[in-house]
Image (tube, rainbow, N blue to C red):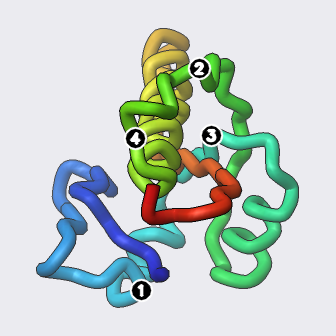
């Protein structure tokens, strides 16, 4: 496990891309950024704000979690669901005139055999 950054937009001048910069190396940028968590999980907000030291605002996603699980491994299902949640919240905010620097989506799934 671990945190991966897949081409996250931080600002027009900073870009964190997998393989070139670790997120923790850019904490100064992240602490100054407008970060939205597309989740209603109080634990995720607590981790990001109190443990990591960010200033994250939570906005729950209304994305229907109805992706066809048979087309994904548990890991790719979680990644795709989290991506859809983040995109849904980002689009909603942009329509309202906001321009967050980063929207984080998260999801959790339990799997009896993660190799399936």
The outermost residue toward the left is: 20
Q: Which residue is mark 2?
A: 66
Marks 2 & 3, CB-CB < 8 Å contact: no
Q: Which residue is mark 1?
A: 24
Res 18 quadrant in image: bottom left
Q: Nearer the viewer, mark 2 or mark 3?
A: 2
Give how far across and how far down residue 40 sits, in percent: 80, 41
The outermost residue toward the bottom is: 25
Who is closer to the viewer here, 74 or 63? 74
SS assignment at label 1: helix
**First in residue order: circle 2 vs circle 3:** 3
Residue at 62% across, 25% down: 65
Q: Nearer the viewer, mark 2 or mark 1?
A: 2
Q: Is residue 91 above or below residue 16?
A: above
CA–CA distance in space, label 2 to label 4: 12 Å
Give how far across and how far down residue 33 sits, in percent: 47, 59
**First in residue order: circle 1 vs circle 4:** 1
**First in residue order: circle 1 vs circle 3:** 1
**First in residue order: circle 2 vs circle 1:** 1
Q: Which residue is mark 3?
A: 38
Res 111 quadrant in image: bottom right
Q: Which residue is mark 4?
A: 72
**First in residue order: circle 2 vs circle 4:** 2
Does any portion of residue 108 appear in the rendered image? yes
Query: Badge 1: how crowded within 10 Å, few (<14), some, or many (20+)?
Result: few
Query: Badge 3: how crowded within 10 Å, few (<14), some, or many (20+)?
Result: many
Query: Badge 2: how crowded within 10 Å, few (<14), some, or many (20+)?
Result: few
SS assignment at label 2: loop
CA–CA distance in space, label 3 to label 4: 22 Å
Residue at 36% across, 71% down: 4
CA–CA distance in space, label 2 to label 3: 17 Å
């Amino acid at each position: 496990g671990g945190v991966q950054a897949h081409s996250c937009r931080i600002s027009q001048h900073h870009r964190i891309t997998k393989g070139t910069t670790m997120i923790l190396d850019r904490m100064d940028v992240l602490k100054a950024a407008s970060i939205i968590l597309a989740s209603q999980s109080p634990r995720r907000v607590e981790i990001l704000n109190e443990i990591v030291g960010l200033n994250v605002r939570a906005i729950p996603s209304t994305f229907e979690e109805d992706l066809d699980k048979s087309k994904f491994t548990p890991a790719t299902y979680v990644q795709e669901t989290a991506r859809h949640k983040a995109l849904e919240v980002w689009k909603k905010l942009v329509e309202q005139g906001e321009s967050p620097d980063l929207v984080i989506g998260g999801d959790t799934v339990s799997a009896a055999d993660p190799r399936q």
